[in-house]
Every structure is written in C-alpha cells, then in structure tokens.
Amino acid sequence: MTKRSLIFLSLIIVGCSHNAYKSSNRVYKKETKAIGELIRQEPADYFSMQDSPWIGAVNFDLRKPNFVIIHHTAQNGCPETLHTFTITQSQVSAHYVICKDGTVHHMLNDYLRAWQAGISKWGNNTDINSSSIGIELDNNGFEYFTDPQINSLLILLDTLKTKYKIPQENFIGHGDIAPGRKLDPNWRFPWKLLADHGFGNWYGDTTAVIVPTGFNNYQALRIIGYNIKDTMTAIAAFRRHWLLDSVYKPFDSLSEKILFSLSLKYQ
C-alpha cells in the first residue's frame, strides 16, 4: 500500500470513528440491510402472475458513479454538517464530507444514491443523484478553502477517478448543474488546480485564440453541459467556474475565447 493510500485510509478511519453517531449508524445499517434484501429479490417476484419461470442472468455487477459533484456545506463547521446529514428531517446527504483540517468523513457507500444534487441538469442528465458521488467541503460560502482540505480532496478524487474510471470532464460543481439555484463551491474554489491534477477541464493560453464568426455562446454552453433555459444564470455559473467571478458579468472577448476553447474539448 502506498504512502498516499495509507494517509487516505487513516483519514477515512478518523471520519468513521465518532461514537456520537451510534444512533444514526444504526439507521444506516437498517436502511442498507433493507436495500440488500430488495436487491436479492428474484425478478420473478415482480411477475408472479405469469407462468414463465425465472431465469437469472449471470453477467452483472453494481452500477458505478460517472460524475463527482463538489459542494461547499454553507454551514458553520463540520459538526453542524454531520448533524444535518444524520437526521432524517433534513432530507439531504453526501457521500463524503471534508473538514477544514483535512479530515475525511465517508458517510455513504459510493454505490448508494445520496440526496445531494437536488433539481439539476448536466447535458441530458436530469437525475444527477443516480450517477454521481457528492463531496461536501466544510465552508460557509464566504471563505477560502484550506490547504489541508484541498490536499485531502485531491487524494480522494484520485481514488475515485481510478476506482470508477470517471472521465476528467465529469468533475463539476453543484453550481454548474443547478445554475441560479446553487452557487457552490463558491468562486474561491481552485478549479484550475484540480484540472492540473486531472479532475475537470481547463483552458490554455488564449492569446492566439480566434473565435470564429457566428460562434454561438449559448450553444457552446449547452455543449459543455450547462442548462441554458435561463441564459443569465448559465453564464454566471460558467464565469464563476472558469473565471472565478464573484458577481454576474456578461460575455466579453476573453470569456468568449475561454468558452470557445473549452467547447472544443467537449465535442
């Protein structure tokens, strides 16, 4: 086992060792047991009115996540977030929570469907929860992310990308899939750093980029994955991710060059 793997494993163990959550852990075990029993049901159970015998297929495995959605918690510290994710009233969850000190809490099996994306869309995918892993970073939305936090995130992303063969372009933010409704992770998030490590796309030098005549900004946003039903919020989400804008700005020459360069990566 590599040093990186050992560090990550130790973070996971720390994240799962809190006795204060015995009650919610029992709920987790009960719910996963019920899901397991559901999976073990023979398909014939659903068609008991038919006379044809059940014939079980032998080539199958679990469905794997294909996206990673990155959030900020918009709460005041990890204890508050952990509480939110361990009470049924909240109706929200995530697979991982990363605290400011770099501690990683693995809260839900990667193969299970977390309630983290909400009403969202990316490309033609309107059920992001069913195809993604949600990662929450402890951040109230008005502060920079810490170095230990980002270091742990990079290790986690490397693990997930390798394990599930997640495409580089499928590491995106909550604000990307729900423009206008969500802003996380906030504009301070280091997307370029992630892209430099292979998690998400980025653009190169735009000095020599020539945007062709007739280039359609909105079509390019759609090609990348954005929902352009509300073009203003789509533009704001794009600029927050790739230009680190904190407030809405319309397209200008630079942002059009960046958009054009990025759209070529998604075609």
Image: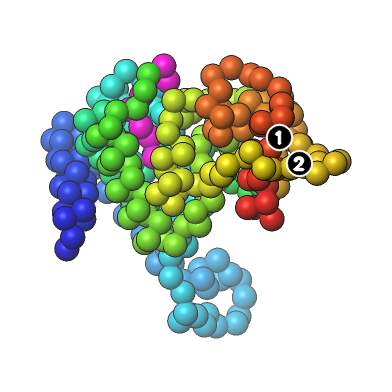
Residue sitting at x 16%, y 31%: 20
Q: Helix, strand, or loop for circle 1?
A: helix
What is the x, y in percent for residue 160? 37, 54
Verify CB contact (< 8 Å) between mark 2 and mark 1. yes
Q: What label sits on residue 46 in the rendered view?
A: none
Extreme-right residue of the structure = 214
Is 243 left, or right, of 59 in this rendering?
A: right
Quarter occupied by residue 100: top left
Q: Which residue is mark 2?
A: 211
Quarter occupied by residue 217: top right
Is 233 left, or right, of 5 in this rendering?
A: right
Magenta residues, start to end:
134-142
Q: What label sits on residue 256 in the rendered view?
A: 1
Considering depth in this image, is 126 or 48 the residue closer to the camera? Answer: 126
Q: Helix, strand, or loop for circle 2?
A: loop
The type of residue carrying mark 2 is: Val
Residue sitting at x 20%, y 40%: 15
Considering depth in this image, is 257 or 246 the residue closer to the camera? Answer: 257
